[in-house]
Amino acid sequence: MSSSVIDFIYQRKDHYITRWKADFDPLAFNDAQSEALADELKMEMIDILLNDLYTEEQGLEARLRRLADRLIHYGFPLGNFIRGLHSLRRLLRNDLAVEYAEESLMEFEARMDDLVSTLVDESAKTRENIIDSQNHALKELSVPLIPVFDDISVMALIGTIDTTRAQHIMENLLEGIVEHRAQVVLIDITGVPVVDTMVAHHIIKVYEAVRLVGAQCILVGIRPEIAQTIVNLGIDLRNFSTKSTLQKGVEAAMEITNREIKELPRA
């Protein structure tokens, strides 16, 4: 964008800020604090548009990235700010059309297009990073292998199991077995709502992987309806060690590791 156009906008920036504030529809807020924050964010956007006209492209991207991060962090709708950008764009273009030729207007439009595209791109990147971080944290927390005694660990599966989640279960399980030096692993499927052919296939693969690393595996939490489904599907679990409840599984694991629970006499 030519320096004369930049100078024209910069010299009239206070005028445009006043007009833009009057035209920009206010957002709906729950309290005064969020309204004040929204005003702060809008002023930051104005600062980027009108005060950073001389800023290099790389510096402008950094400012837009920071604005996008704040918009996402505080939960303000990006669409409202995009509409605000277009509102200011119309104000500027109408005045520029009186003073400058079409070529200068096209340069101005190109700059505004870049600003909008960069803000949208940076917002999308921020959302993707947040989603990736949340997914990573969720995967780490959702299927931990928990040691309950020396050599005995439990993994409780909760929710549906698809191919991606089954892979994470497998990774966490095998890493946990090595880390905790588990001899017996109890896989509790009490929290798995439905066991179909695919889910059963994933559970069988996990079971076999445990045995391949030298640990024994006990499948626990097989409810009557799950047992009936497994039978109806023709899934053969005869070679698998199974128990109906976690308690019975722990008792079996203690026998395998030569432990027993004794009731102490009451004082």
Image (cartoon, helix red, strand yellow):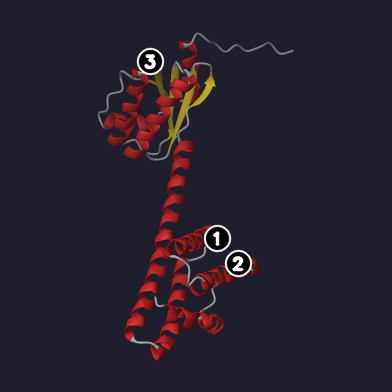
Residue 63 sits above or below residue 80 on the image = above
Q: Residue at x 53, y 82 (%)?
A: 11
**Mark 1 is on which residue type?**
Tyr
Q: Quadrant of residue 262?
A: top right
State the image coordinates of residue 63 (x, y, percent, origin top left): 50, 63
Q: Which residue is mark 3?
A: 214
Q: CA distance from mark 2 to mark 1?
A: 9 Å
Q: Position of residue 28 (x, y in %)?
A: 55, 72
Residue at 26% in and 32% down: 233
User: What's the mark number on residue 74?
Assistant: 1
Q: Can you tell which mark lies on residue 238?
A: none
- Nearest to N terminus: mark 3 or mark 2: 2
Q: Nearer the viewer, residue 91 or 30?
A: 91
User: How many discs mark residues in the rendered view?
Assistant: 3
**Quadrant of the frame with the N terminus:** bottom left
Which residue in the protein does label 2 denote? 37
- Spatial distance from mark 3 to mark 2, Cα to Cα? 58 Å
Residue 9 in percent (x, y) is at: 48, 81
* Amino acid type at mark 3: Gly
| Residue 162 in sight from this viewpoint | no
Residue 228 position within the rendered picture, expressed as x and y whole percent measured from the top left: 33, 31
Q: Nearer the viewer, mark 3 or mark 1?
A: 1
Q: Quadrant of residue 56?
A: bottom left
**Mark 2 or mark 1: whose residue is earlier in sequence:** 2
Viewer-proximal residue among 189 and 72: 72
The amino acid beneath tag 2 is Leu
Q: Is residue 257 above or below residue 79?
A: above
As helix, strand or loop, the secondary structure at mark 1 comes to helix
Q: Are marks 2 and 1 in contact (CB under 8 Å)?
A: yes
Residue 186: in sight, yes or no?
yes
